[in-house]
Image (tube, helix red, strand yellow):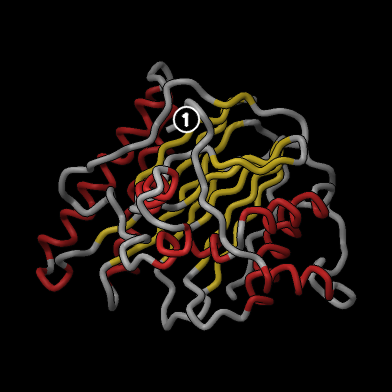
Amino acid sequence: MSPMTDALKSEYDVASILSVGARERQEDAVAVAFPDRTDLGFAVLSDGMGGHAAGDLASRAIVAEMFASLTLREATAATPIPEILCGAVRRANEGVKACIEASPDHGGMGGTVVATQISGDKLHWISVGDSVLYLFRDQKLRRLNADHSMAPQLDLMVAKGAMTQAEAEAHPQRNCLTSAITGGPIDEVDCPDRPIVLEHDDIVLQASDGLQFLPDPIIEALLLRARNNSSQQIARDLMDALDTLNDPEQDNTSIVVIRANAPGRQSRKGILGRGSGAMVKALRRAVKPAVVPAPGQS
């Protein structure tokens, strides 16, 4: 596990963390910018694909291009944030295309992206692929962004009685992306015109799909128990939970935790430390449920 960034002191308590999991290399990339003592900021996360070094290169290229575009947003302050986010994704796509053209060996490289932009109490986002954006509010966890993979389509087939839940969960194409940043046309982009208005004690999670090795009810339970802790501790608790699973297929995982109006840091051990046998058993028993975007946010 790589060192975590220090939680940033501002109106928002923000931290990020990455883990290689059971993979040989890290193909996730993250960039966070929340200036001190402001209520403005953004975070960008990408899960690369393409094999060998290409996935690593793709995620870093996507995050670098997105970061550069969003850093320059002050020069176009009159531009609506959704337009700024869409422009940043276009620039990231062009960056991946340039990488492929410069090295034919990188053909097939690409990645997902989920980026959040906060201005005051308003949360805007853009996403392509299956990286997740969650909101934890009033003790409930919900996914905000659309899942651009085969999973929603398979779950729809289950709802129609065309296959069983077990068949859908085990389907070999379940995790195949239906949209990604590959340097070519982007089939699906989730970028709502209307932002989410954040409330006191809201917790926003951005993560690569490695986090989804944890079922949503477990993530919700972890956030419920850790809701009064710093973003840094919450991120560590989520990684501790993944480590507890000890899954030999565990993917790279990157997480950004954003707490609205968060209290000061608290020093304590991860909640999955000693004396947490019940939670460990729950993790091992849990069956991953289907995740459906919140109404009106797909």
Q: In this view, does 210 lie above or below 289?
A: below
Horizontal side, residue 95 vs residue 59: left or right: left
Q: Is residue 176 above or below residue 203?
A: below
Question: Residue drawn at (33%, 53%), measured in percent from left and top?
Answer: 150
Q: Position of residue 38 (x, y in %)?
A: 66, 32
Disc 1 crowd rating (10 Å Cα; few below 14, some 14-19, many 20+) is some
Question: Residue drawn at (40%, 20%), measured in percent from left and top?
Answer: 80
- Viewer-closest of 48 and 283: 283
Question: Residue drawn at (42%, 50%), measured in percent from left and top?
Answer: 158
Horizontal side, residue 226 vs residue 70: left or right: right
Q: Position of residue 130 (x, y in %)?
A: 41, 52
Report the residue marked by disc 1: 297
Look at label 1 and name its amino acid.
Gln
> Which residue is at the far front?
161
- Is residue 67 in sight in this rendering? no
Horizontal side, residue 54 vs residue 44: left or right: left
Numbered disc 1: secondary structure: loop
